[in-house]
Structure formats: structure tokens, C-alpha cells
């Protein structure tokens, strides 16, 4: 259902004629039987494409959200992440970074050992690094189609490895660099110490998010919001890009006019529905992705309760599961 009324302009104060809306974005999953999947999966999870546009330039937005650096809007940037590839009987599976317990010190050591190889092949210097992300101008790898760890984790990596687009041989060049780094780390002290602690080895480097800030196509609902709320660094980056206030957590003071993408939205729903009932907000725009397609619904107080013909009895509130279905 389309919005009843467009949101407020960024950083404006609501006037009596404007509805106070809270927008809640839910994460979406891939639909792998899409027609386009025969040539490889679409880049980006549904919510990543919604937030950033079809080019899904994750790397420069993540860099903007995790550093104080100025980011050249025309420069193509890549995100590199040290990862663990889990070997099964006949294929490799990418593990999420929250499953491998990589420390900031280990990440720095791994980068230092691989830095000469990385900077030689990328023909650039690393712009910024932290525990989970390293950023570098993409240089000769700018044309690669790549997939984020969030999109590719838990799956056979054969389907999710970087692919050539309009220039052949770039994916092969990346795999050569990746193999060199894998061999370097295999005999390095970081993995030796991790093995002694019973931790999964850091046995590969993942590239993703290749793009530039000028390719960001954020939705109007986000750009016109009063505040962005959520812990994902994508939101922090978009807040910097559009000059919007940014907060990690939802509270009664920042809910009106806000755009939120929360890690556990079901836990915040009682607070959101209470804000509707108390008239702190007039409506909730709920954005989700059934079967990978964007869906937006407007919820008001009356939508919080089950429909009943027994008008003399108080209606029961809908559960979070019923709301999202």
C-alpha cells in the first residue's frame, strides 16, 4: 500500500497539518529462484537495495559510517574483510564475522602481513581499517560484481564469488590475490595462536560493496526523516551523507519522524505500538520484503487490534508475528 502522505522534510519541525510518522524497515532475504539468478545472484539483499539503490555501493557508505574521513563521492571504493571459509565434503561455506570472534589486534596483524600484496594489486593505499572492515580505492577491481558477507554467509561460495561484468579477467586477478593472501595467512602467527585456542582460522579475504557515493539512491522516506535509528553502520553512513541526526537506540524522544532499522524489531514493537496509542505518533510505515519484493504498509492505532464482530468486547492486540505476516 502506498503512503497516505509524504513524510516531513529533513530536519523540519512538524506543523499541525502534518502526520507524525515513524518508519520501520525490516531486513529482507534473497529469492534465489529469480529469473536473473541464472547469470548470478542480484547484488545486495533486498533491504540493501532499498537503502542504497540497485548499484548497492556499500563500501563507501560503510566507510562514511565508521570513520571521520571525508569520502570522495566519485571514487570507487572496495570493502575487504578477513573471513573464515568452512570446508564441507564438497564445497566451502562463508561464515559470518560474528561467528569467528576476530579481535582488533588480530585484524591489524593480518592486514599488516597482507598489506604489500593488497596495495600492489589495488595500486592504492588502504584508507581505513577497523576490526571487521578494511577500505581501499578499488582501482583495477572497480568493475567486479561482488556480494556482501551478510548476503553470502552460510552458502556455497562458488555462487557468491566476485564476477566479471564488462571487463574480463578481473575476477581471475582477484582470485589470484586472494589465494596468495590465503597462503600467507595459513602459515602466519595469528592462525597458529587461534588454532591453539580452538578458534576457526582466518583463511581468506572477502571483497564486497564496490561502488561510489554518487551511486547512492536512498529512498525519500529516509532522506525526509528527522532522525536515523539503528546500530548498522550503513545507517551511520547515510546519516553523514544526508546530514541527518543519527542515534543507536529508539526512545520516546526520537520516535516521531524517525526512520529505523533495528536488529531486533520485535523487542521494540511494544514501545512503538505504545507510542501510537499514546498519540506520540500518528502512524507507522512498516517496510518489509516478502519474497524479496518491497512492501510498505501504513499502520494506525486501529490496525493494532484484531478485527472482531463482537463489538462489546475489547479487541485483542495483534502479535508481532501477525503484524509482519
Image: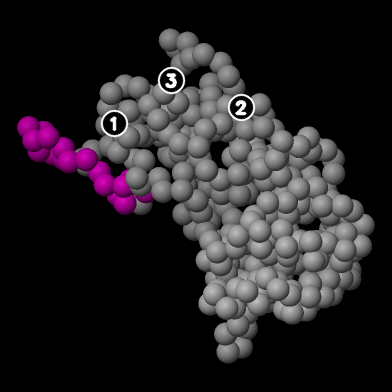
Residue 115, image x, y percentages: 83, 62
Q: Nearer the viewer, residue 249 or 187?
A: 187
- Relative vertical location of residue 63 with respect to residue 219 in this rendering, above or below: below
Q: Which residue is mark 1?
A: 274
Q: Residue at x 25, y 44 (%)?
A: 318
Outermost top residue: 16
Question: Which quadrant holds residue 223?
Answer: top right
When the figure is inspected, residue 57 is found, relative to residue 178, above or below; the finding is above
Q: Earlier in the sequence, mark 2 or mark 3?
A: 3
Query: Which residue: 56% across, 31% down?
Result: 246
Residues drawn in magenta: 308-324
Q: Residues within 10 Å of mark 2 (few under 14, many from 20)?
A: many
Residue 28 seen anywhere in this rendered image of the structure: yes
- Name the residue tied to disc 2: 244
Residue shown at the point (79%, 72%) measured from the top left: 181
How far separated are the C-alphas under marks 2 and 1? Answer: 25 Å
Label 1 crowding class (10 Å Cα cut-off): few <14, some 14-19, many 20+? Answer: some
Amino acid at each position: 500500500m502506498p503512503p497516505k502522505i509524504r513524510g516531513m522534510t529533513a530536519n523540519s519541525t512538524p506543523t499541525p497539518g502534518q502526520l507524525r510518522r515513524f518508519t520501520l524497515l525490516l531486513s529482507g532475504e534473497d529469492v534465489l529462484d529469480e529469473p536473473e539468478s541464472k547469470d548470478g545472484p542480484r547484488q545486495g539483499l533486498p533491504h540493501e537495495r532499498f537503502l542504497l539503490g540497485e548499484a548497492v555501493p556499500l563500501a563507501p557508505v560503510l566507510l562514511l559510517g565508521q570513520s571521520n574521513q571525508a569520502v570522495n563521492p566519485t571514487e570507487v571504493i572496495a570493502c575487504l574483510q578477513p573471513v573464515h571459509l568452512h570446508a564441507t565434503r564438497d564445497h566451502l561455506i562463508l561464515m559470518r564475522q560474528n561467528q569467528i570472534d576476530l579481535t582488533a589486534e588480530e585484524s591489524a596483524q593480518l592486514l599488516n602481513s597482507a598489506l604489500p600484496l593488497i596495495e600492489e594489486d589495488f595500486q592504492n593505499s588502504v584508507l581505513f581499517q577497523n576490526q571487521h572492515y578494511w577500505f581501499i580505492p578499488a582501482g583495477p577491481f572497480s568493475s567486479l560484481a561482488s556480494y556482501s558477507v551478510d548476503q553470502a554467509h552460510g552458502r556455497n561460495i562458488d555462487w557468491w564469488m566476485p564476477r566479471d561484468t564488462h571487463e574480463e579477467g578481473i575476477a581471475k586477478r582477484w582470485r589470484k590475490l586472494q589465494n596468495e593472501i590465503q597462503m600467507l595467512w595459513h602459515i602466519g602467527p595469528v592462525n597458529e595462536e587461534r588454532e591453539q585456542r580452538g578458534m576457526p582460522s582466518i583463511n581468506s579475504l572477502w571483497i564486497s560493496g564496490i561502488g561510489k557515493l554518487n551511486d547512492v539512491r536512498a529512498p525519500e522516506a529516509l532522506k525526509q526523516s528527522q532522525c536515523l535509528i539503528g546500530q548498522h553502520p550503513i545507517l551511520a553512513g547515510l546519516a553523514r551523507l544526508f546530514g541527518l541526526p543519527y542515534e543507536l537506540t529508539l526512545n520516546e524522544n526520537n520516535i516521531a519522524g524517525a526512520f529505523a532499522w533495528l536488529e531486533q524489531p520485535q523487542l521494540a514493537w511494544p514501545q512503538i505500538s505504545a507510542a501510537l496509542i499514546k498519540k506520540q505518533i500518528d502512524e507507522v510505515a512498516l517496510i518489509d520484503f516478502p519474497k524479496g519484493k518491497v512492501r510498505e504498509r501504513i499502520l494506525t492505532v486501529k490496525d493494532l487490534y484484531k478485527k472482531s464482530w463482537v463489538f462489546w468486547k475489547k479487541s485483542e492486540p495483534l502479535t508481532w508475528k501477525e503484524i509482519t505476516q
